[in-house]
Amino acid sequence: MRGRTARSAVIPILKTGESRADTVSVHSPDGTAAVVGGALVIVPPAHDGRPAVVRAEPGIELVADGRESGAGPVEAAAPGGVEARLTEDAPRVEVRIEVTRDELGATMSVERLPGTRYRLEDQPPNHAITLRRLVAERVPCAEPTLDDLRAALDAHGIVYGVLDEALERLGRGAFSETVARGTAPVQPEDASITLLALDGGGAERFVRAGTLLAQVARPKRGQDGVTVTGEALPVPDPRPAELRIGDGVIVEGDGRVVATLDGHARIADGVVAVAPALVHEGDVRGSHGEISSPGSIRVTGSVEDGLLRAKRSIAVDDAVRRSTVEAGHTLAIGGPAFDSVLRVGHTHAALEALQLLTGPLARDAARLQQGCGQLISASRASGRDLHPLRVLVMVMERVAPDLEQHVRGALAEADRHRGSVPYDMLSSLRAAQEDLDAIRIGRLPLSRLGGVAAAFEQETARLAELTAVPPSCTAPFLQKCAAEVIGTLHVTGKGALESNLRVRGRLELAGEGAILRGGVLDLDGTATVAELAPGAGDGLTVVLAPGSVLEARVVHPGVRVELPGGRAQRLAAVATDVRIAADDVAA
C-alpha cells in the first residue's frame, strides 16, 4: 500500500499437545513443523532461532537422523530430518472357545476384526506440534478356513463329537455355534419292586391262585458317556431286585410275581411265598383272640379257650379244649377234643347249593345267545330286519322263559351265604345280572349275551373246583363236644363220649374198641359204628332222617332210636350186627 508505513502482522499459532500456547511472529527466527496433506513439513530456524519440536501420540513412531526416537520429543532442524512412521493394524480373526462345565459341549465364537491404515492429521505450522493419526482406510478381514477352526479346537483339546456343519457355518460368516457335543452317559435303571397283594410290613394276606402279588421291573444297563475332550464317563452296573421266590409263587417273563395256589402270601427277608395255610406256631390261647382266615389255618400246638374260623380247612396238631373251631371244608384234629364246638362243611354246602343254580343259568344264557344269533340270521335271509329287543323276547320265551327269575334266585342264595361265597364270585354274578337287565331294556347290545353266559360258566367251573373234595372232620376222640358236620365225621380213636353229633353225610366210628356213648347222634346220611352205649344221664339218642342208615356191630340196651314220622324205639337187649334203615323201618 502506497503512502503508508508497513507493519509486521503477528499470527497466533496454537501448539497442540503443549501445556501452553505460544505465538510466533512471521519474522520469528524459530523453525516450525506442520502437517500438510498428511506429510510432515519442517521449516528450519533462521539465524539463531530454535528448531521445531515434534512429538507423537501412540501409533506413530518418530525417526530422527535415522534413529528411532519413539514418541519424542525430537528437534527437527532441517526438512527430512524427522520421519513419522504410522503403525498399521492388520486384519485378524479372534476365536473364543467355551466348554460346558460337564465337558459335554463346546461353543466357538468367531469375531472378524478388520485392519486399519492411518495418515497424519493435518496441522498448521507451529514451533512444537504433536502428531496425531487419522483412519485412512479399513482393510477387510478374510474368512477363516476350516483348517484354522479345527486347529483352534485341537489347541483346546476338543477331539470328540466335532460338528463339521457348525464349522462350515462359522466359516461362512456365523458368529457363534455349538461346535462339539459329547455323548451324555445314560444312567442305569435299578430293578424296582412294586408290591401289590403283599404287605411290605411282612403281615400275611390271603390270596387266590393267579393273584398278582408284585411287579418286578427288571434292571436296565446304562451307557458310558464321552466328553468333547475324549474322556470316558463310565456308569455303574444296575442293581438287581432284592427279591427271592419261595413256595407257591412263580415269576412270569414280564416280571409279574403270581401266586400259584390259594393261600397266605407273605414277604419276609426278601422272600415271597404263599403258604397253603395260615400257620400259628405253638399253642392257641384265649388271649390270642379270634384267629380267622379266608383260606386255611394250621396250629402246630393245641387250642385251649380259643376261637378258630377258616373258610377252607383247619388243622390242629394237638388237642382242642373248651374252644370253638369252624372250618368251611375240612377239620383235622391231631389230639382229643374236649368241651368244644366243632362246625365243619358249611362253606362247602353253600357253594354246592349255589352251583346247583349257576349251572342251569350258564346253559340257559348260552342257549339264549345262540338262539338270538340264529333268529337274526334267519330274519335277514328272508329280507326282514327284526328289532333286537323283539328277537330277545321271542327267543327267551322259547328257550329260557324263567332265566331272570333263576338269576335272582341264584343271587339270593349267594347273599344268604355271603360269608361263604368268595367276594369276587358274588361281584361277578351281580355284574352278569346287571348286564342281562341292560340287554333286556336295550341299553346294551345283544352281543353282550356272550359275556353273561361266559360269566355264569366261569363261576360254575370255579364252584365245581371248590367243591371237588368232599368236606370232612377227623379227630381221634370227642368228649362233651357239639359237632355239626356236613360231609364225613371220622373218629379214628376211642370214640365219642357224651357228645351231640349232627352229621349230614357220613359218620365213621368203627375202629377197634371205639364206642359212641351218651349224647345225641342226629344223622342225615349213613353211620358205621363199632359200638353204641347209652352212658349216663339221658343216655344215647340216635335220630335218623329219611333215607338214613345206621350200621353197628354192637348196640347196648337203653339206646334210643328216633325214626321219621315220630316213631321211636329203645333197645331192651344187646344187639349185634345191627342195620337200621330209616325208610324201611318207617314203612
Image (tube, rainbow, N blue to C red):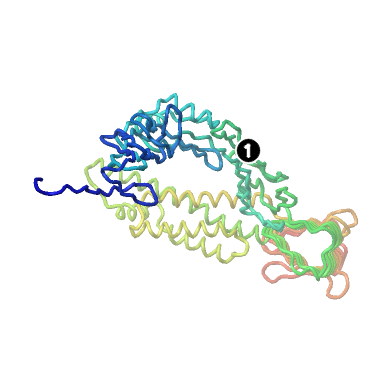
Percent x, y of residue 311: 68, 59
Rendering quarter of residue 225: top right
Left or right, 118 with respect to 511, comes to left
- Kindly identify which residue carries mark 1: 235
Image quadrant where one finds the C terminus = bottom right
Q: Is residue 152 above or below residue 564?
A: above
Residue situated in front as seen by the camera: 261 or 348: 261
Q: Looking at this rendering, what residue extends furthest in the bottom direction? A: 537
Rendering quarter of residue 438: bottom left
Q: Looking at this rendering, what residue extends furthest in the top direction? A: 147
* Residue 184 visible, this angle: yes
Image quadrant where one finds the N terminus = top left
Q: Looking at this rendering, what residue extends furthest in the left direction? A: 2
Rendering quarter of residue 579: bottom right
- Name which residue lies at 75% across and 50% down: 269
- Name which residue lies at 24% across and 47% down: 385
Percent x, y of residue 274: 70, 50
Left or right, 467 with respect to 578, comes to left
- Name which residue lies at 40% across and 48% down: 369
Q: Is residue 57 above or below residue 262?
A: above
* Residue type, numbered disc 1: Val
Local secondary structure at mark 1: loop
Percent x, y of residue 147: 44, 24
Residue situated in front as seen by the camera: 376 or 256: 256
Left or right, 541 with respect to 194, comes to right
Residue situated in front as seen by the camera: 51 or 206: 51
Residue situated in front as seen by the camera: 110 or 378: 110
Percent x, y of residue 194: 61, 50
